[in-house]
Image (cartoon, grey):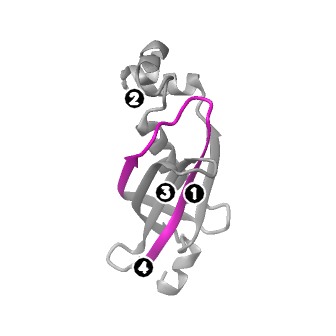
């Protein structure tokens, strides 16, 4: 693959989006699975005493789903192009709480992509977010991934 074919595997401006709700059960299950015993994620009374008033999703829960969206999308072959993805760097900032049963939109947008001959793949920089529909982001992310076309 060369620089002209990079848009086949990942292209600037490409967007991945998912809308979902974290149920209370989702938040509790993730807290147990990740060994996150922060009362804000598991104890309604403790969360009510805190400034949030109710349990909130762990930041790593939102970040994990964002990373999973990238891995799923850029490891697909459903469009006739077989590819594999490697996460190289991720940074997240947690700007506000994600409450149970609140509808949020998780989104990634490819800011740039460029063929890297040394790595034999496309390096892409992405901007991500978790937002309440049409509101300011609760979580923002920046990521760098490597996407390679699989030629058999």
Of the two numbered discs 1 and 3 in the rendering, the one whose residue sits closer to the viewer: 3
**Dot 4 or dot 3, earlier in sequence:** 4
Q: Which mark is residue 128?
A: 3
Q: Residue at x 51, y 68 (%)?
A: 110
Disc 4 residue crowd, few under 14, some 14–19, many 20+, Cα 10 Å: many
Query: Which residue, given by chain and number where applicable, does mark 4 sit on?
Result: 115
Residue placed under numbered mark 1 in the picture = 73
- In percent of width and height, residue 103 lies at 64, 39
Decide: is 18 above or below 29. Answer: below
Distance Cα–Cα, label 1 vs label 4: 19 Å
* Cα separation between marks 1 and 3: 14 Å
Say if mark 4 contacts mark 2, CB within 8 Å. Answer: no
Q: Gap between marks 4 and 3, in whole Å?
A: 21 Å
Look at the picture and state if 22 lies above or below 19.
above
Residue 71 appears anywhere in the view: no
Give the mark nearer the N terminus: 3 vs 2.
2
State the SS at label 1.
helix
Residue at mark 2: 34
Q: Nearer the viewer, mark 3 or mark 2?
A: 3
Of circles 1 and 2, the one toward us is 2
Query: In this orientation, which residue lies closer to the viewer: 69 or 82?
Result: 69
**128 in the magenta segment:** no
Image: magenta residue range? 89-113
Q: Could you say which quadrant of the image residue 146 lies in?
A: bottom left
Image side of residue 92 versus residue 105, left or right: left
């Amino acid at each position: 693959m060369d620089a002209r074919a990079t848009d086949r595997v990942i292209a600037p401006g490409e967007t991945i989006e998912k809308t979902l709700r974290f149920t209370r059960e989702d938040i509790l299950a993730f807290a147990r699975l990740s060994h996150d015993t922060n009362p804000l994620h598991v104890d309604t009374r403790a969360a009510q005493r805190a400034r949030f008033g109710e349990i909130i999703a762990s930041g790593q829960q939102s970040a994990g789903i964002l990373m999973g969206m990238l891995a799923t999308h850029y490891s697909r072959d459903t469009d006739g192009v077989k590819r594999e993805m490697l996460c190289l760097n991720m940074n997240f900032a947690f700007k506000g709480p994600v409450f149970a049963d609140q509808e949020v939109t998780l989104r990634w947008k490819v800011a740039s992509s460029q063929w890297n001959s040394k790595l034999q793949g496309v390096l892409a920089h992405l901007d991500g977010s978790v937002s309440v529909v049409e509101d300011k982001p609760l979580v923002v992310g920046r990521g760098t991934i490597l996407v390679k076309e699989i030629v058999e």
